[in-house]
Image (cartoon, helix red, strand yellow):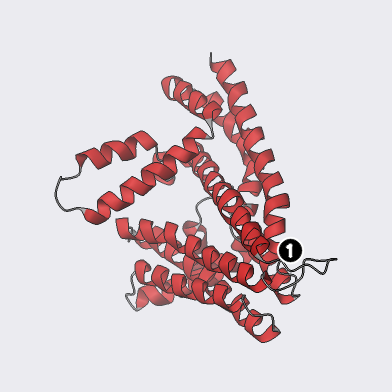
Amino acid sequence: MSRFNALLQASFKSNDTEEWLDVHFTRPIGLVFALLWNKLNIHPNVITILSIFLGAGAGCMFYYTDLTHNLIGVGLLMLANFCDSTDGQMARLTGKKTLIGRMLDGFSGDVWFLFIYVAIAMRLYHQQIPCTDVAWGIGSWILCSVAGFLCHSPQSSLADYYRQIHLFFLKGKDGSELDSYQKQVDTLKALPKQGAFWERLFYTNYAKYCHSQEKRTPAFQRFFMKWNASQKEETRLRFLEGSRPLMKYTNLLTFNLRAIVCYIACLTDHAWLYPLFEIIVMSAMYVHMHRTHEQLCEELSRELA
């Protein structure tokens, strides 16, 4: 048991950035699968691909209104999440990290929720809007498109960015996946003119992803440039002190909370609750997290100046 606990701790990114439900439920189960699949010499990328099919299957199940299909959807999405946890834990414990793995890891969650939003939009299409006798119709597609593309996507990308920033200041470059737009552009330019298709595809899209994160965090970009020039230990510790309370929002804006709300909404046949929760509640958390983080960076920038 002590060896298992030691491996479990080693598989965490950090105690600051792990969510309670992951620490006590998802990660231990993921580690059991990781140890089993590693013993069978199954590569983490295979597990990620499996999670994509499981998550897509879960989304399809949420199209139906009966309890059986929705319970299957809950089970499939939970399995997909266990697989997603497993591949990351295996990669951290065994060092089996690849470019394709990074591509698949970012792609998998997007596929899950794309299927979920499409399924909910189709499910609601012929249902009546609550307290009216009017069908959702095209409104269901508008609702789910706003929730998915305008809310969910920027929320999860910025939450991931803030988590990687925190890990960088906590554990240094080796303990974080914090990247910059310019670094991806330089990597793209260094690739050979011919071939390297997958590398070009990854770094082109990853550069856009990094650029979108940097555009939304001007105060952090100014602070980070000044801190890199000074490397003041006191400032690093002050940043971590201010950033640590925000990690709960980065966790809430990733998987667990939105999955739980999705489960409840679909199982009670009030599927419209999930995209509405995304638009109202999750967006409010996103705005608070973003504003607080930028204010922290502005304050520390002034002190460095």
> Compared with residue 13, is residue 231 higher up or lower down, i.e. above or below?
above
Q: Name the quadrant containing residue 18.
A: bottom right
Q: Quadrant of residue 297?
A: top right
Side of 158 relative to 89 (left or right)? right
Q: Looking at the image, which is closer to me, 182 or 224?
A: 182
Point out the residue furthest to the right here. Answer: 131
| Up-down relation of residue 241 to residue 49 (above or below) | above
Q: Residues within 10 Å of mark 1 (few under 14, many from 20)?
A: some
Q: Residue at x 74, y 75 (%)?
A: 269
| Along the line of sight, the residue nearer the viewer: 231 or 75 | 75
Against 150, residue 55 (above or below) is below
Q: Does any portion of residue 227 appear in the rendered image?
A: yes
Count of picture labels = 1
Q: Residue at x 60, y 30 (%)?
A: 294
Give above or below for 174 relative to 52.
above
Question: Where does the image place residue 253, in percent across and percent down from the top left?
Answer: 62, 52
- Front residue of 207 and 250: 207
Residue lying at the far top of the rendered structure: 305
Is 243 on the left or on the right of 4, as rendered?
A: right
Is residue 231 visible in the rendered image? The answer is no
Q: Residue at the location (69% across, 80% down)?
A: 65
Residue at numbered disc 1: 273
Residue 120 on image: x %, y %: 63, 69
Amino acid at the residue labelled 1: Leu
Task: Give the image location of residue 47, x and y in percent.
Answer: 40, 71
Quadrant location of the N terminus in the rendered image: bottom right
Q: Which residue is farthest bottom?
A: 68
Q: Nearer the viewer, residue 61 or 234?
A: 61
What residue sits 27% from the left and 36% below the top?
186
* Image location of residue 201, percent across then percent down: 30, 52
Which element type, helix, strand or loop, lies under badge 1? helix
